[in-house]
Amino acid sequence: HELDSDRAPDASVFPRVSGHRLPPALSTVDGPKATNKFWANWVVHRGAGSPIYPMPYALQWRAIGACKAAELTISHGSPHNHYGGNAGPERIAYFFTPFVSELSLG
């Protein structure tokens, strides 16, 4: 039995949500993209300039200079991160890492 990857999924299981399609950005590879990964922001145009969080770091692309060269900026959570709250024994309720550019590769 072969899977038909070109066929739309069953609408009773996966109802179509209008207006939410996010076409891929910066990709020359045809086909579906895995977007449930930490780097999902970089796969769509709307999130291409947003940071991603491969903990304990945060990474963000930015354009520099008139030629718009790419630069990868890196932020380390400590000492800027914040966490707290009580979600149960020995569990925190939230972890927040603001992006503070500390190193750049370009």
Image (cartoon, rainbow, N blue to C red):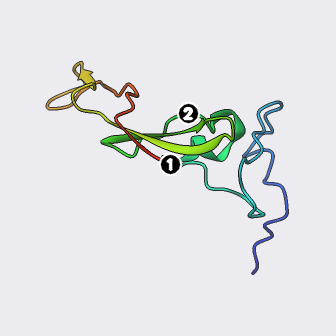
Mark 2 and mark 1: Cα distance apart in space: 17 Å
Q: Which mark is residue 24?
A: none
Relative side of 86 to 18, left or right: left
Q: Residue furthest bottom?
A: 1
Q: Residue furthest left?
A: 90
Q: Residue at x 37, y 27 (%)?
A: 100
Residue 102 screen position, x and y as percent: 34, 35
Residue 85 screen position, x and y as percent: 24, 18
Quarter holding the N terminus is bottom right
Q: Residue at x 34, y 42 (%)?
A: 57
**Three-letter amino acid code at the position of disc 2:** Ser
Q: Earlier in the sequence, mark 2 or mark 1?
A: 2
Residue 45 screen position, x and y as percent: 71, 38
Q: Residue at x 78, y 34 (%)?
A: 17
Front in this rendered view, residue 12 or 64 = 64
Front in this rendered view, residue 46 or 90 = 46
Label 1 Cα crowd, 10 Å radius (few <14 / some 14-19 / many 20+): few
Name the element at disc 2. loop
Relative side of 24 to 54, left or right: right
Q: Is residue 8 above or below residue 80?
A: below
| Tag 2 residue | 50
Front in this rendered view, residue 94 or 29 = 29
Q: Which mark is residue 106?
A: 1
The quarter of the picture where residue 68 lies is top right
Name the element at disc 1. loop
The quarter of the picture where residue 53 lies is top left
Number of dots carrying numbers: 2
Q: Residue at x 23, y 32 (%)?
A: 78
Label 2 Cα crowd, 10 Å radius (few <14 / some 14-19 / many 20+): some
